[in-house]
Amino acid sequence: MAISTNLFSLSSILYSHFTMSASSTVVSITVFITLLCVCLVIGHLLEENRWANESITSLLLGLCAGLVTLLLSKWKSSHILVFDEELFFIYLLPPIIFNAG
C-alpha cells in the first residue's frame, strides 16, 4: 500500500513540474537525435557510392522530416520548425568551424 501511494505522489509531483511545453521539448530533442543517428548510419552505409554522400542523405532526410512535421501539424507553424539563432551560433557553428580546420 505504501509503495502505491509513493508512486502516486511521485507521479503527481512529476506531472505538476513537467508541463506540455517540457514534454514537447523532449520530443523535439529526441527527434533531432534520432535523425542525426539515422543520417550517420545511412552516410556510413553509402560511403562507397560516389553519387550519394552523407551531406546529400542528411539534406534529403531533413527535407522529409520537415514535410512530415508540417503534415502532422496540419500546415500550421510548429515550434520545432522555428530557427533559433542562439542555438546555432553557440552549439552548432563551433564544431563546423573546428572541423574545417
Image (spheres, helix red, strand yellow):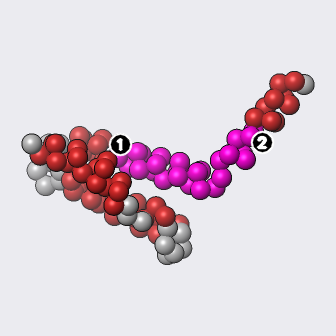
Q: Is residue 60 above or below residue 12?
A: below
Mark 2, residues whose alpha carbon is within 10 Å: few (<14), some, or many (≥20)? few
Q: Closer to the observer: label 2 or label 1?
A: 2
Residue 17: x and y in percent read 68, 46
Please count the marks in the image.
2
In this rendering, position of residue 74 left or right of residue 99: right
Residue positioned most to the bottom: 75
| Dominant secondary-structure state across the stretch colored magenta | helix
In magenta stretch: residue 83: no
Determine whether the residue tagged by mark 2 lies in a helix, strand or loop: helix
Residue 54: x and y in percent read 21, 49
Q: Amino acid at mark 2?
A: Ser
Question: Which range of residues does the magenta coloring cover?
Answer: 11-38
Q: Which residue is mark 2?
A: 12
Q: Residue at x 79, y 32 (%)?
A: 7
Q: Which residue is mark 1?
A: 37
Residue 90: x and y in percent read 31, 50
Q: Quadrant of the N terminus?
A: top right
Q: Is residue 21 above or below residue 73?
A: above
The quadrant holding residue 62 is: bottom left
Q: Residue at x 16, y 48 (%)?
A: 97
Camera-nearest residue between 91 and 51:
91
Name which of mark 2 and mark 1 comes first in the sequence: 2
Is residue 68 among the parts visible in the rendering? no
Residue 32: x and y in percent read 41, 50
Q: Amino acid at mark 1?
A: Cys
